[in-house]
Amino acid sequence: GGAPAPPGPEGLGEALARAHRTMRWLKGLPPGVEMVSMASMRLGEDDAVVLADFLRAKGGRLRELDVKCNNLSAAALAHVLAALPSCPRLVGLALGENPVGPEGGALLAKALDGLPALQKLGAGGTRLG
């Protein structure tokens, strides 16, 4: 299968309810933010859904995204990767120390084609396979 479809309004609503801390954190970022560092914030799948929604809406100027040292599974990573084409200036992506496994590695390999500006990719400790 391809990238997961963005969750419908009810799925996003449920994720927002469970990931209110992440939503508040993202709302505190300045408009046109160029670097988002969410390392070691214990992010999971609901947080990834909220982050993906943020990236689609406000990722146009984003240059670096750091989500290393979290609890992002392959399913969680899929949400984030599906939103990255909304970030055409993205040059740095840090995913290390997340349990994405080989499935996440396959998703990442597919997503890289849609990230022409990407120069730095950190994926150590992800057991990509």
Image (tube, rainbow, N blue to C red):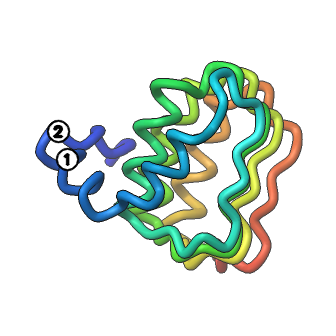
Please name whichever residue, 40 or 114, is drawn nearer the observer in this view of the structure.
Answer: 40
Q: Is residue 87 above or below residue 24?
A: above
| Residue on which the image places disc 1 | 13
Say which amino acid is labelled 2. Gly
Residue displayed at 70% across by 77% down: 97
Q: On the image, which quarter does residue 85 sit in?
A: top right
- Percent across and percent down for residue 71 are 52, 76
Q: Quadrant of the C terminus?
A: bottom right
What label does residue 51 carry, if any?
none
Lateral position of residue 118 relative to residue 7, left or right: right
Please name whichever residue, 30 or 125, is drawn nearer the observer in this view of the structure.
Answer: 30
Please name whichever residue, 91 or 65, is drawn nearer the observer in this view of the structure.
Answer: 65
Q: Is residue 113 above or below residue 80?
A: above
- Please name which of the two marks, 1 or 2, marks the residue nearer to the observer: 1
- Label 1 and label 2: CA atoms lie apart by 8 Å
- Percent across and percent down for residue 7 are 23, 43
Residue displayed at 70% across by 21% down: 61
Decide if residue 29 is in sight here.
Answer: yes
Q: On the image, which quarter does residue 112 sit in?
A: top right
Decide if residue 101 is in sight here.
Answer: no
Sequence-first tag of 1 and 2? 2
Lateral position of residue 39 relative to residue 5, left or right: right
- Percent across and percent down for residue 126 are 67, 75
Lateral position of residue 77 relative to residue 46, left or right: right
Say which amino acid is labelled 1. Gly
Residue displayed at 56% across by 79% down: 99
Q: On the image, which quarter does residue 34 sit in?
A: top right
- Percent across and percent down for residue 59 are 59, 27
Q: Residues within 10 Å of mark 1 (few under 14, many from 20)?
A: some
| Residue on which the image places disc 2 | 8
Q: Residues within 10 Å of mark 2 (few under 14, many from 20)?
A: few
Q: Secondary structure at mark 1?
A: helix
